Image (cartoon, helix red, strand yellow):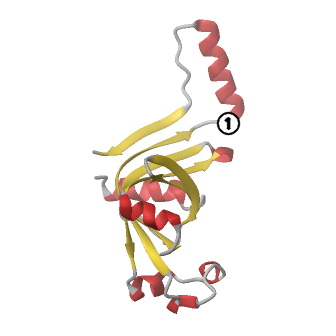
């Protein structure tokens, strides 16, 4: 697992992005769909609202191994995180993260029988962050092509977890 400092760094990378692509297995075939973060900090677990009747909920129960990716092309930030998913119907959790954005998706409100929290405990991941502008990145690529021995320096890349 990562240190508290590294978890803070991951949060700084994904906090402004907010929407990640959740990948589950649908009868052995990877399937992705957008999910919106609802928490205001990251401690190794990600939280999302979902419907119990949603296909992703059945897929996550059938095979708990999931991946979620976050991407911000404008700022050159890419994060991939893998972990174990599970559904939670804890009323305190539902209340804790409830907000007007979530309310728009659940007509029955917090008491909707179909509402659940999707908890993803992150085991490992990787992130990339460009240090420089697109112009500098193009320069690095051109330099690598001309010199043939130079690998372009596109920024930071780090794996975390096991």
| Looking at the image, residue 11 lies above or below residue 157 | below
**Spot occupied by residue 142 in the image (x, y as percentages of width and height):** 67, 16
Give the residue drawn at x 36%, y 56%.
63
Question: Can residue 120 be seen?
Answer: no
* Placement of the C terminus among the 4 image quadrants: top left
- Quadrant of the image occupied by residue 103: bottom right
Under tag 1, what secondary structure?
loop
**Residue 33 versus residue 157: which sits nearer the camera?**
33
Query: Residue tagged by mark 1?
Result: 133
Question: Can residue 78 be seen?
Answer: yes
- Quadrant of the image occupied by residue 46: bottom left
Callout 1: few (<14), some (14-19), or many (20+) C-alpha neighbours within 10 Å? Answer: few
| Looking at the image, residue 20 lies above or below residue 158 | below
Give the residue drawn at x 58%, y 57%.
33
Q: How many marks on residues?
A: 1
Give the residue drawn at x 55%, y 52%.
32
**Spot occupied by residue 16 in the image (x, y as percentages of width and height):** 60, 60
**Spot occupied by residue 150 in the image (x, y as percentages of width and height):** 53, 13
**Spot occupied by residue 45 in the image (x, y as percentages of width and height):** 38, 64
Outermost residue toward the right in this view: 135
- As drawn, is 31 to the left or to the right of 141? left
Give the residue drawn at x 45%, y 75%.
117
């Amino acid at each position: 697992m990562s240190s508290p400092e590294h978890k803070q760094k991951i949060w700084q990378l994904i906090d402004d992005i907010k929407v990640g692509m959740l990948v589950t297995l649908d009868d052995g075939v990877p399937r992705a769909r957008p999910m919106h973060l609802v928490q205001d900090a990251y401690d190794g677990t990600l939280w999302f609202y979902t419907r119990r009747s949603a296909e992703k909920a059945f897929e996550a129960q059938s095979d708990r191994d999931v991946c979620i990716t976050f991407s911000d092309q404008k700022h050159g930030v890419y994060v991939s995180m893998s972990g174990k998913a599970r559904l939670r119907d804890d009323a305190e959790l539902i209340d804790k993260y409830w907000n007007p954005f979530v309310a728009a998706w659940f007509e029955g409100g917090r008491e909707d029988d179909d509402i659940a929290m999707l908890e993803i405990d992150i085991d490992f991941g990787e992130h990339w962050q460009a240090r420089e502008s697109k112009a500098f990145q193009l320069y690095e690529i051109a330099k690598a092509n001309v010199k043939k021995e130079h690998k372009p320096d596109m920024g930071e890349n780090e794996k975390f977890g096991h």
